[in-house]
Amino acid sequence: MALDWGYGQTNGPKTWPECFPDAAGPRQSPIDINPVDLKTLNTNRKLQWKYVPENTDEVSNQGYGWKVQVNGEGSELTGGPLDGKYVLEQFHCHWGESNDRGSEHTINGETFAGELHLVHWNSTKYRTFADAAKYPDGLAVLGVFLQPGRKHPELEKVVAQLNRIEYKGENAKINVPLNPAQFLPSNSGYYTYHGSLTTPPCSECVIWIVFKEPIEVSHDQLMTFRTMKSYSREDNCPCDEYKGFVKKNFRPTLPLGQREVKECRQ
């Protein structure tokens, strides 16, 4: 049962703590960010990143969405709220049934069509991604809001492969260089706080950096996300409310509690 989590009525986020105790913890993500009266992040170190486009490896259907695995060698995320160097492990996306909601984080209650997550791990302190995920400063995730608009050329390199990974467990090589830096909004400030993975096991190991400015993706790109199937080719279609399609894969916001969100105008 532990592996059978999802976003439906019977296996959705409310049920996750039964199998994943961390999901009931005090530092869970996502949250609603209220920009009023936020403290400013005091740092003289600008958030900086670099990626190797040729190291973007393959895209897979996880059953709850797509994920692009990256060879992190040569990648680097530093500065801002981070101590040390973080390297890129993977990126993935969350979306909803329609374009008016689908982001995990919200801004003063406002939702976006989707949210892209670039997941990095602290290679200065830890030896592997799995090791880093056990510690509060182990991972750093860049969150980017998606809003309907123009087709995003870099994201299209992922979208173009989705018809090859229609079913859970399938994967496809991305045979063209793909630069994750193209997903990051230029000159955008960001919000940062300590939180968790937004999917099981929901470990509280993430320094979140959520960009203020969204990027544009096309309606067709969002629609293609929703054509993915949540079951494997040899399995029967589940009789759930989504008829086996990944129509919605975002976790609702959770209480901020005693945590503090800081703002950086970068």
Image: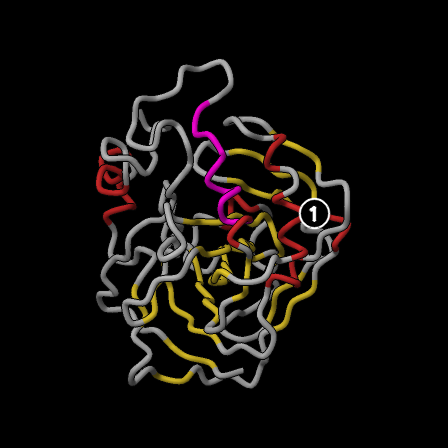
Q: Where is residue 57 in the image (x, y as percent from the top left)?
A: 70, 42
Q: Can residue 27 be seen in this view?
A: yes
- In this rendering, position of residue 96 left or right of residue 154: left
Q: Is residue 143 visible?
A: no
Residue for point 55% across, 46% down: 129
- Of residue 67 and residue 123, the one placed in the foreground of this image is 67
Which residue is denoted by mark 1 in the rendering? 56
Q: In which quarter of the image is the N terminus?
A: top left
Total label count?
A: 1
Residue for point 58% across, 81% down: 45
Residue for point 37% across, 45% down: 97
Magenta residue span: 221-231
Q: Where is residue 226 in the image (x, y as percent from the top left)?
A: 46, 40
- Of residue 104 and residue 263, the one placed in the foreground of this image is 104
Mark 1 lies on a secondary structure that is strand
- In this rendering, position of residue 174 left or right of residue 201: right
Q: Position of residue 79 (x, y in %)?
A: 58, 74
Q: In this view, does 170 lie above or below 80?
A: above
Q: In which quarter of the image is the C terminus?
A: bottom right
- Of residue 100 and residue 125, the one placed in the foreground of this image is 100
Q: Position of residue 127 (x, y in %)?
A: 60, 48
Residue for point 47% across, 81% down: 264
How many residues crowd around disc 1 within 10 Å: few (fewer than 14), some, or many (20 or more)? many
Q: Is residue 53 magenta?
A: no
